[in-house]
Amino acid sequence: MLTAEDKKLIQQMWGKLGGAEEEIGAEALTRMFCSYPPTKTYFPHFDLSPGSDQVRGHGKKVVAALSTAIKNIDNLSQALSELSNLHAYNLRVDPPRFSLQFLSQCLQVALATRLGKDYSPEVHSAVDKFMSAVASVLAEKYR
Amino acid sequence: MVHWSAEEKQLISGVWAKVNVEECGAEALARLLIVYPWTQRFFSDFGNLSSPTAIVGNPKVRAHGKKVLTSFGEAIKNLDNLKGTYSKLSELHCDKLHVDPENFRLLGDILVIVLAAHFTKDFTPACQATWQKLVGLVAHALARKYH
């Protein structure tokens, strides 16, 4: 459960990224495709080569959604309601508790490489919990 | 039989050469106990684990973290025989310690994040992929003797 302190840490951390959010999205996806090749099966229609415009574009989308979630961190269910429908009925990505765990890991690695020791244990914990909460919301309508 | 390319071996040894085993081990274990608090169930005799600050400063956590990562170093010396290297430890974690192998995966992922924070942009996607492969195989080897 996200505490008030967790929420504060996440918003602070996101604020520290100074506009790098979009790059981080693309990087997280690139890392995910590299470390977890089965995740590529959801993107047969994409050019997944390094620096691909499609990956950049998609990374931007993912990060924008996360930004929205962070701004509405007190009501994730509502903020992510559309995306929840999309993932359940259209995309049908393997239930987010599995796939999102890979995206969460790679997003955290991307954040850690940028923030170094500012990616403290407390921030790490808050982000991990947040991504877990996002995954739960996205999985709500699966069945 | 696991295959390691020359590039993967280089990515592993290159990173490992620069790792302070004591610091890194302590940090990884502390983060495990902080990010996944239920893992504290295995360390009830470690004393004060009441807050992130207490956990990070706890000398038993530091010492055990060092032990765990030192063992990881053994794996790195024996990349072609992870199963053999971890055979006894696997039995120990099952029979005496009663640790759910899922925890090995959690610790592995945390170790990767600790390395990322330490090496920053040098921890490239290719580097991460190699280390995710390694921690996955170590977790698998540790789970192998469970019954």
Image (spheres, grey):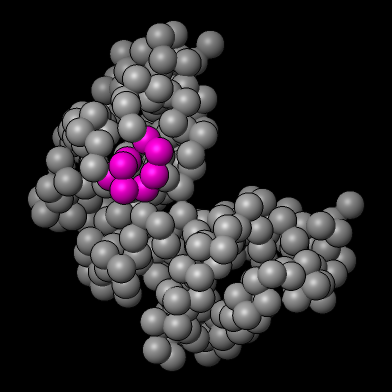
Residue A143 screen position, x and y as percent: 89, 52
Residue A29 screen position, x and y as percent: 51, 71
Please determine whether, in this image, residue A104 is positioned above or below residue B75: below
Nearer to us in this view, B99 or B135: B99
Residue at x 46%, y 68% (from the top left corner): A9
The outermost residue toward the top is B95
Residue at x 47%, y 26% (from the top left corner): B41
Determine the image quadrant of residue B54. Answer: top left
Nearer to us in this view, A1 or B121: A1
Relative to A107, A130 lies left or right? right
Residue A98 located within the stretch drawn in magenta: no
Residue A2 screen position, x and y as percent: 60, 58
Range of the magenta residues?
A: B49-56
Residue B50 located within the stretch drawn in magenta: yes
Nearer to us in this view, A56 or B100: B100
Nearer to us in this view, A46 or B41: B41
The answer to whether residue A120 shows anywhere in this view is yes
Determine the image quadrant of residue B121. Answer: bottom left
Q: Main secondary structure of the magenta part?
A: helix
Residue B28 screen position, x and y as percent: 31, 45
Relative to B133, B27 lies left or right? left
Residue at x 45%, y 83% (from the top left corner): A15
Residue at x 40%, y 83% (from the top left corner): A17
The answer to whether residue B75 shows anywhere in this view is no
Please determine whether, in this image, residue B118 is positioned above or below residue B101: below
Q: How many numbered circles does the render carry?
A: 0
Relative to A5, B82 lies left or right? left
